[in-house]
Amino acid sequence: MDRVVVKTKSSAETIRIGKNIGSRLLPGDVVALVGELGAGKTQFIKGMAAGVGVGRPVTISSPSFTLINEYLARIPFYHIDLFRLQWEKEAEDLGLEDYFQGEGITAVEWADKIPNFLPKELLLIHIAYTGKHTRSIEIIGEGKRYLTLIDQIRRAKIGVLKQKE
C-alpha cells in the first residue's frame, strides 16, 4: 500500500485532479471512492471521465436511481453509485464482478458499502471536508498496478501534501 494526499480549494481543482488521474487509467482499473455526502466524489469522477475521454463529462451525475451508468470513451467508463444501498447483500445482483474484471474503467461511489465485493487491488480515493470549499483527497494504491499509479501521481506533483507512510 502507498498513498499521497492532495488538497483542493474548489470543485474545479477536484475535477482537475480527477482528470489527471483519469488520463493515467487503463482497461480493468477500479477506483473506489468514499467520503461524506457532498464531499466531491461526483466532481472527482467528472474529472476522471474527462481524463478517460468521455465526450461531455459535465453531464455525469450520480446515477442514484439506476445505480450504474456506462459511458463510451477511449476505454469504456462505468460509474457506479451505491448511495441508495442499505445493505451490502443488495449488491449481489448488480453483476459488479463483471465490471471489476471487464475491459473498462470502473469508478464506484460509496465503495465503503460493499467491502466484500471490491477487488483486493484497486485505487481508493477518500475525500474529506477540510473547510467550506477545501477538501483533502487521500489516494491509496492497493496492488502492484496501483502502486505504479501512485508513483506516477507523485511524480506529476498535483499538489502532494503527504508522501508514503
Image: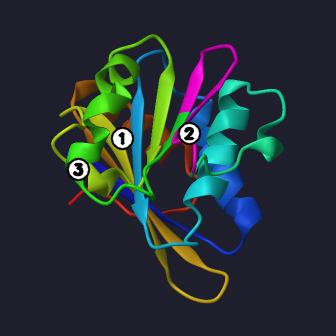
| 3 or 2: tag closer to the N-terminus | 2
Q: Specify start and end residues of the magenta stretch as a single range.
A: 65-78
Q: Which residue is under mark 1? A: 123
**Disc 2 element:** helix
Q: Earlier in the sequence, mark 3 or mark 1?
A: 3
**Secondary structure beneath label 3:** helix
Vertical order, 111 against 116 (above or below)? below
Question: How many residues crowd around disc 3 within 10 Å: few (fewer than 14), some, or many (20 or more)?
Answer: some
- Which residue is at a point 73% across and 24% down the rendered structure image? 53
Q: CA distance from mark 3 to mark 2?
A: 28 Å
Pinpoint residue 121: horizontal percent, then vertical percent.
23, 32
Evaluate if marks 1 and 2 touch, with contact meaning CB atoms under 8 Å apart: yes
Say left or right for 60 vs 40: right
The residue indicated by pointer 3 is 88
Q: Position of residue 29 (x, y in %)?
A: 41, 25
| Front: mark 3 or 1 | 3
Q: Distance from label 3 to label 1 (Cα)? A: 20 Å
